[in-house]
Image (cartoon, rainbow, N blue to C red):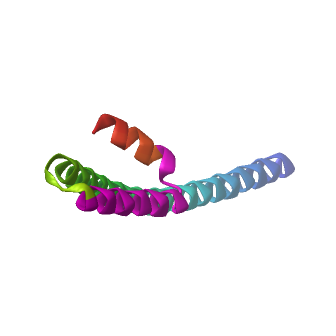
Amino acid sequence: MFFCSEVVGQIGEAFETLADEVRRRKDTMLAELETNHADEQTILARRADSLENLLIDVTNCCEFTQNVIRHGNETEVRTALVIFAVFWYKCSLTGWRMKMERLVFIL
């Protein structure tokens, strides 16, 4: 009978050890998840700021170009269109071209 209770005790200890390890791993994984989530939130906030700034730049550029087209002379209109084309080209180099086309369509 002593042997049986000893085995039962060892099995219980083994499962307690395993349960402790699972709890530690769970805590580690939850901490990693929290860190990753915070990092992702920071990245998303930066991207949102970047897009907001881009939208402001695009809006300003479009408004400027529209005003020059409406009220400027031929030289001013040509100059404004060149400036707009350069701005558009720079945006396309940074990978914002598709987003820019959607934004300009909306504006």
In the rendered image, the quadrant that contains the C terminus is top left
Place residue 53 in its image quadrant: bottom left
Pick the front one: 69 or 11:
69
User: Does 89 appear in magenta?
Assistant: yes
Coordinates of residue 34 in the picture (x, y in percent):
45, 58
Place residue 43 in its image quadrant: bottom left
Can residue 84 be seen at all in this image of the molecule?
A: yes
Can residue 38 be seen at all in this image of the molecule?
A: no
Question: Please, what is the dominant secondary structure of the magenta stretch?
Answer: helix
Residue 80 placement, left or right of 95? left
Pick the front one: 90 or 26:
90
Q: Which residues are magenta?
A: 75-98
* Point 74% across, 55% down: residue: 14
Coordinates of residue 21 in the picture (x, y in percent):
65, 59
In the rendered image, the quadrant that contains the N terminus is top right
* Point 35% across, 63% down: residue: 83
* Residue located farthest toward the left when viewing the structure as drawn: 71
